[in-house]
Image (cartoon, rainbow, N blue to C red):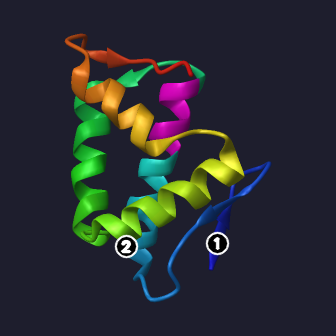
């Protein structure tokens, strides 16, 4: 199952509830925002924690991250790494 951005599809699990899909899609959009402009670090970190509640297994997180990066060109891992390392209140990741 996938949700669609205007240019690509988000990787989603068909077993997720509507609420979970909304939560994960919100996280994907914040990753995009951090790569295209800036996003609140607190908002991104909160969204990541909610994403981790839905995707607790590291292996599944890596798989979803690879699928998301293949579709969007944005790395969840690298974006979150930059967010965790910055001391600023807003995150902007440039690869």
Q: Residue at x 56, y 22 (%)?
A: 95
Q: Which residues are magenta?
A: 29-35
- What SS does tag 1 mark? strand
Q: Find the residue positioned furthest to the top.
A: 88
Residue 73 magenta: no
Numbered label attached to residue 88: none
Query: Camera-side residue: 94 or 39?
Result: 94
How crowded pointer 2 is (Cα within 10 Å; few <14, some 14-19, many 20+) is rated as: few
Placement of the N terminus among the 4 image quadrants: bottom right
Mark 2, residue position: 19
Lower sequence index among marks 1 and 2? 1
Query: Camera-side residue: 60 or 43?
Result: 60
Residue 66 lies in quadrant: bottom right
Q: Nearer the viewer, mark 1 or mark 2?
A: 1
Query: Camera-side residue: 56 or 3?
Result: 56
- What SS does tag 2 mark? helix
Mark 1, residue position: 2
Q: CA distance from mark 1 to mark 2?
A: 15 Å
Q: Is residue 43 left or right of residue 73?
A: left
Q: Report the magenta stretch's main SS.
A: helix
Q: Residue at x 52, y 44 (%)?
A: 29
């Amino acid at each position: 199952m996938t949700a669609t951005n205007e240019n690509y599809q988000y990787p989603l699990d068909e077993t997720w509830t509507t609420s979970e899909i909304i939560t994960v899609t919100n996280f994907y959009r914040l990753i995009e925002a951090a790569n295209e402009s800036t996003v609140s670090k607190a908002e991104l970190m909160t969204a990541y924690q909610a994403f981790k509640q839905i995707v607790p297994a590291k292996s599944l997180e890596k798989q979803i991250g690879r699928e998301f990066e293949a579709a969007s060109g944005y790395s969840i891992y690298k974006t979150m790494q930059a967010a965790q390392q910055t001391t600023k209140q807003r995150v902007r990741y440039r690869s």
